[in-house]
Amino acid sequence: MRRIQLEDLSKQLGFSKTLISMVLNGKGNHYGISKKTQAIVLDAIAKVNYAPNKFAKSLRTGKSFFIGLIVPDISNPFYSTIAKKIENILFEHNYNLLVCSTEENIEKEKLLVEMMVNQQGVDGLILASCYQDATFYERAVLSHIPVIFIDRVLPNFGGNFVSIDNYSGAKEIVTHLLEKGFKNIACFAITPIYLSTINDRLLGFKNAHKHFSIIMSENLIKVVNFEKIMEDVEKGLTEILESDKNLDAVFALNNHIAIALLTCLRKEKFRKFAQVQIACFDDIATFDIIDKKVLSVSQPIEEIGKQASELLLEILAGKKNAKENIVLPPKLIVR
Amino acid sequence: MRRIQLEDLSKQLGFSKTLISMVLNGKGNHYGISKKTQAIVLDAIAKVNYAPNKFAKSLRTGKSFFIGLIVPDISNPFYSTIAKKIENILFEHNYNLLVCSTEENIEKEKLLVEMMVNQQGVDGLILASCYQDATFYERAVLSHIPVIFIDRVLPNFGGNFVSIDNYSGAKEIVTHLLEKGFKNIACFAITPIYLSTINDRLLGFKNAHKHFSIIMSENLIKVVNFEKIMEDVEKGLTEILESDKNLDAVFALNNHIAIALLTCLRKEKFRKFAQVQIACFDDIATFDIIDKKVLSVSQPIEEIGKQASELLLEILAGKKNAKENIVLPPKLIVR
DNA sequence: GTGAAAGCGCTAACAT
DNA sequence: ATGTTAGCGCTTTCAC
């Protein structure tokens, strides 16, 4: 049972392959093919459920109708939510999505990008990069196909991106804590520390203190390795405990850290910190079903996917040329 | 700046395209091409970072090296974890993954399957189907390409699948509750109720009771619509509250329902149920950071992805022919 | 050991 | 208003 193809339709209908192809691609009017003929062709196509061979088409046109999405970890709900939104929007425009995870590994990211561009021939790329600078992309990719960076922003980068205002979000949440009278606020950051998201949140944390002329202790800033979050969070808390500092509140720079903090703080060993206020950049459903009143900022996650895919589609359609930088506002959630 | 192709290499090296193609595809020895020539060719390929045009290759060979993954919702961590595992394994074998969500919509699933098979030309399919019966697949798909069903199983279906032993898991968790002396156990199921996962768990719930000759009340079984989980869970709890039945424990047939239950039970209105034991099919990280000691069964999620992709790869490599049914054991988690 | 040439299924420039 | 034909870049049969 062979797949039906243009040739079959051509024989069956008595029209040339060209004509059928024209009608199929919506260029019937443009080429002045009679309404009647068009109707006959479309009818037959629908009846036998014909779809052109994608490889032949792509080979001929040079367009793949594939978009690549590269993220650090697609099993992370933050990214899978974005992925779903992107997939939905692209699907409506006949584009398909190819998703890969980098595991925060720069080499793997490079490999994936090259594979997508060079081998898969994607028409565009959306990516949450773990690169530190834009050199690789400027040299190897950006001249070939349109790229939209999401979530994380590369320093000194002139290209398209859609991100969250991490600095303001962090400053706002810490300001809220300081205004409520919390004084000794620890901050748990995460590697890779050079990421714009983390950097900006950290800066927001520091500048909120500066704004109130409150001197914060550098010892209350801990950096957690993303590959052993639970372990490092416990270590950080232990150090604070042993340093005999007072601790009012902890600001977790992402949800993974908040989960680890919440887990650790249940341990007998940290009972001194039982009343500590937790604040977290990113809001997750879990915060609604625990007794602790977590303060958080929620990110418009789906909106990132929406903006990124719509921008990419516009560029692909030739409707847009200039580089666009979209920065979305996060929202403080007080429980 | 044109992409490099076989023709360029041919001119540059003085060998025919044929020869280079043979070497590139590892058939150098088979065609008796001298070691020396092979080395020269491989060297040049590496130096200029040549990769064959995928569309031309697929058009010629009829193989796409794409695998389709169709799930109800890729933003659900259960499925995104499976997706990541599958992607990793396939990537090592030069296959790429195409992921789509059905939103539990049979029509959309049909559309997606047809698109993947007919338009994208995927070489194989892995899917968590929301179909009720296998007729569509048996008629339209299974004769074309290999398909692995995961998570959910279609009734009377002779094809490949990888699933969890939902019946035993549910029976075990409910048995544990009954043995601990819980007597009035409610069960919150979810639509679509015909899914094998839900069906089997419900049957496990019932048979555990039967085994202890305990008569359970049908009024304690509630079915929640997956599109308004929170609302329906609250309604179910209210009905139980008003019926003046005693309630010891609630068995949630999936994690979404458990989250909704935990949220509702915090409301003043349900304070009578404050001490109710929660049991859940599926174990999630949240259960570790809340005060309530949730009883759960954990599913070997990554293992589903691993088994499914490895089985598919074997079939594609022609190493396997017979249909295989893999049923993985869940594990009781007592807190 | 190596190369020439056909052809995978489609689109689009050019004819008519 | 419709048809002929070349060619996208690759693999593979067949010839040498």
Image: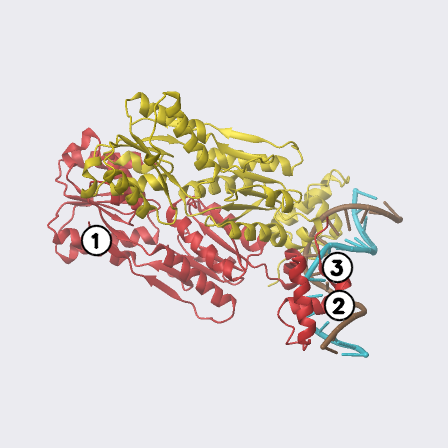
Chain colours: A yellow, B red, C brown, D cyan
> In the image, what residue type sits under mark 3?
Asp
Placement of B47 over or under D14, stated as above or below:
above
> In the image, what residue type sits under mark 1?
Ile
Foreground of the two, A329 or A36: A329
Q: Nearer the viewer, mark 1 or mark 2?
A: 2
Chain at tag 2 = B
Where disc 3 sits, the SS reads helix
Image coordinates of residue B100 in percent, x first then y, are 48, 48
Q: Identify the mark at residue B173; answer none if there is no mark.
A: 1
Where disc 1 sits, the SS reads helix
Asked if badge 1 and badge 2 are on a common chain, one would say: yes
A19 left or right, relative to B89: right
Image coordinates of residue A81 in percent, x first then y, are 44, 40
Foreground of the two, A323 or A44: A323
Residue with the mark numbered 3: B8
Placement of A59 over or under A86, stated as above or below:
below
Q: Quadrant of the C terminus of chain A?
A: top left
> In the image, what residue type sits under mark 2?
Ser
Foreground of the two, A155 or A103: A155
Residue with the mark numbered 2: B16
Q: How many marks?
A: 3
Chain at tag 3 = B
Instruction: Residue at 26%, 53% (x, y): give it.
Output: B297
Are the two marked residues, 1 and 2, in contact with CB atoms closer than 8 angstroms? no
